[in-house]
Amino acid sequence: MSQSSATFGYRDVDASEKPGLVRGVFDRVAGKYDLMNDLMSAGVHRLWKDAVAARLNPQPGEVILDVAGGTGDMAHRYAKMARAAQERRGGEDATVFVIDYNAEMIAAGRERGYPPEVCWAVGDAQRLPLPDACADAYSITFGIRNVTDVSAALREARRVLKPGGRFVCLEFSRPTNSLIRAAYDAWSFNAIPRIGEWVVKDRESYQYLVESIRRFPDQKTFARMIGEAGFSNAGYVNFTNGVAAMHTGRAI
């Protein structure tokens, strides 16, 4: 794949085309996105996200970025945890910015209500509308595989974090057990597009999402990319035998 190309599922497309293609996917699925996550993972994604929020450990007065934050389910967790810490020991309100490339996803999140700590903005993970070194923590959950240039998004995460700032990324990954891998592949390619067709009336978008997972780098490769982008202590924790992985680092 050339530098001017990008992956879109199993297709290689011109890099300039991918943002519009991805936007089209999430325009179509925004209204049922959270329901589909529950159906696709039997609710297990909620446990993974709880573990990510605990690792991020939001604190009073912090600026926290929820990039590719979609409907804001992670932002709700961060705001709740920061407020609980504030009630225990005081401090300023935290600010949680949900930044997503897709306005339809943000609209769906705003429509269902949100805590006062949460702010919303349409923005590109590769070109965030924020100054250098402005954030204490950065998270991106099931979003980085959809950006056109993953390395550029990681460098941008480093740019907006303060030195020592916390980076956490939750993404689907490579199962470490061959039996689980076979079962996961069968579920992904046979069931998930069908569920998408049934619930959202859109098989094609969920076919893309499944394929995009398979094209994403494995755990060790992605951890190396995080380190190359300017993070120390880049590492990962597998969830459900590697079906998903939480990647972490500290801004240098």
Image (spheres, grey):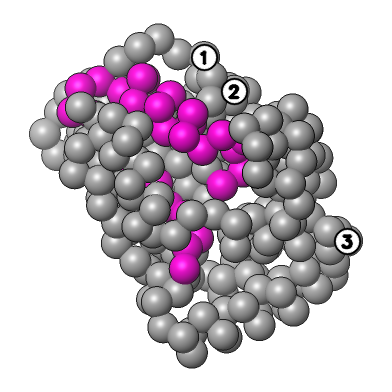
**210 with respect to 126 (left or right):** right
Residue at position x 47%, y 63% in the image: 173
Say which amino acid is labelled 3.
Lys
**178 with respect to 122 (left or right):** left
Determine the image quadrant of residue 160: top left
107 inside magenta stretch: no
Relative vertical location of residue 5 with respect to residue 213 in this rendering, above or below: above
Residue 105 location (% of width, % of height):
68, 38
Residue at position x 76%, y 41% in the image: 13
Residue furthest out toward the top: 131
Q: According to the image, label 3 marks what residue?
A: 201
In contact (CB < 8 Å): disc 2 and disc 1: yes
Residue 155 location (% of width, % of height):
40, 27
- Mark 2 vs mark 1, CA separation in Å: 7 Å
Residue 101's mark? none
* Among the two numbered marks 2 and 1 on one chain, the one whose residue lies closer to the N terminus: 2
Say which amino acid is labelled 2.
Gly
Give the magenta range.
145-174
154 inside magenta stretch: yes
Q: According to the image, label 1 marks what residue?
A: 129
Q: According to the image, label 2 marks what residue?
A: 123
Front-lying residue, 2 or 134? 2
Judged from the image, the secondary structure of the residue bearing numbered disc 2 is loop
- Mark 3 vs mark 1, CA separation in Å: 34 Å
Relative vertical location of residue 215 with respect to residue 140 in this rendering, above or below: below
* Among the two numbered marks 2 and 3 on one chain, the one whose residue lies closer to the N terminus: 2
Quarter of the figure that contains the C terminus: top left
**107 with respect to 128 (left or right):** right
